[in-house]
Image: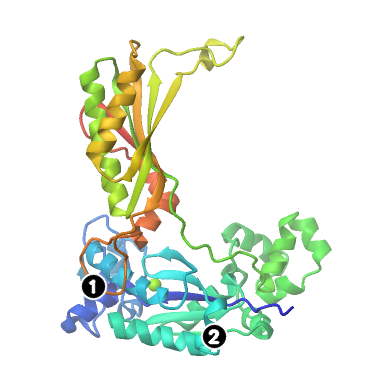
Amino acid sequence: MSLRQRWVLHADMDAFYASIEQRDRPELRGQPVIVGATSARGVVAAASYEARRFGVYSAMPGFRARELCPNGVFLPSDMARYQSVSRQVRAVWEEFTDAIEPLALDEAFLDISGSLGLYGTPLALARRLKQRVHEVVGLRVSVGVAPTKLVAKIACTLGKPDGLAVVQPAEVEKLLDPLPVRRLWGVGPALADKLAHLNITTIRQLRLYDPEWLRRQLGDRAVELQARARGEDGREVESARAPKSYGEENTFLADVSDRETVVAALSAHSEAVARRVRRDGFVGRTVTVKIKLAERQAASSGAVRSDRLYPVLSRQKTLPEPTDDAVLLQRAAVRLWDDEKLAAPIRLIGLSLSGLEAKATLQLGLFEAPGTTAIGPTLDAIQARFGTQAIRRGAESPEKVTPTLRWKRGE
Ligand SMILES: [Mg+2]
């Protein structure tokens, strides 16, 4: 049995948003272009390499960027355009492997272990990928290839811009050794300080430190930390899977018992769920209605009053055919509500669609025109599904659709 060498490729577009602007507006080429800091409170979303020479980088507050680079060209973000370019880039990556883990609109891990046959070597594949990205979108991508995610990402970052680095297994230590420990995942400022007190500032010092001593200082995480210092990283490239369900729910500002209000809420939820499901290219067959009653009940016998909970009912219906049609969702949901014959007031109602499958009529592909709505899972959709940001956004700033409804999104 031969053990196949695993190869992870990290691809990261160079100054993505700023490069798109420079590509589309030739007069901006060679100029310090700064995207996303046009409002008073905005932060820099991307800075061209010309702007970086002034010390401007992404996530910097706009006012600071203006101080450093007063003659910079400040542009608003045009996310729709960047997302459409992102989909084209993603399609190029799909030419090389199915195992793609997106990290951002312009960045992903690709497991290319099974794709080398056509190209011979990781270097040849990486060259071809860079070339294809340039042919298709006219932009530069930096690439790092290594046996692990950790090393691939570091190699990619070190090579920017327009980088191309392949790190052979035997070269990993040579690459990592001179770097500061902060380069390793999981080493934040606090841990870096702690390590500095042990006279560990480089990855080599961390790697060679006496394991028992380090364990006494840092506890169990010392083992994993030293493994990382050797470039070890067992994490697989996790390609995006379909979400399990799409859901919308709202808490009423006052308890509700009339059918009209409930039906209005279910209709709005049906529309919202159907829109999201369609956007991501799925259909689903199981409709679930969630109802939270307004009267508290004891969680269990002997519970004190403050432990009393609002009972939650959940009712499901499976449709004959999977759908992304709001009308069908709404009908099924209202039927479930009516069948329940609830007299008691409720405080929350939700609707979700599960039993999802990809809508198989059209594929997201190479030939998608920029600016069209993607059919099939898109990169932004994947981020919305898997990014914790999407969940946080829902919890922190619930959309207020009407004065009586407060909304929450769940996946
Ligand atoms: Mg990038």
x, y (%) of residue 188? 57, 60
Sooner in the amino-acid sequence: mark 1 or mark 2 = 1
Residue under label 1, please give it: 70
- Left or right: 9, with 334 as reference point: right
Q: CA distance from mark 1 to mark 2?
A: 51 Å
Number of residues whose C-alpha sits closer than 10 Å to that of mark 2, classed few (under 14), some (14–19) or many (20 or more): few
- Residue ID at (65%, 66%): 234
Q: Secondary structure at mark 2?
A: helix
Q: Please state the horizontal and vertical placement of residue 1, each as a whole percent of the image.
A: 74, 78
Residue type for callout 2: Gly
Q: Which quadrant of the render holds ligand 1?
A: bottom left
Question: Does label 1 point to a residue whose CB lies under 8 Å from ligand 1?
Answer: no
When the figure is inspected, residue 383 is found, relative to residue 289, above or below; the finding is below
Rendered view: 27 above or below 394: below
Which quadrant of the figure contains the C terminus?
A: top left
Residue at the disc numbered 2: 117
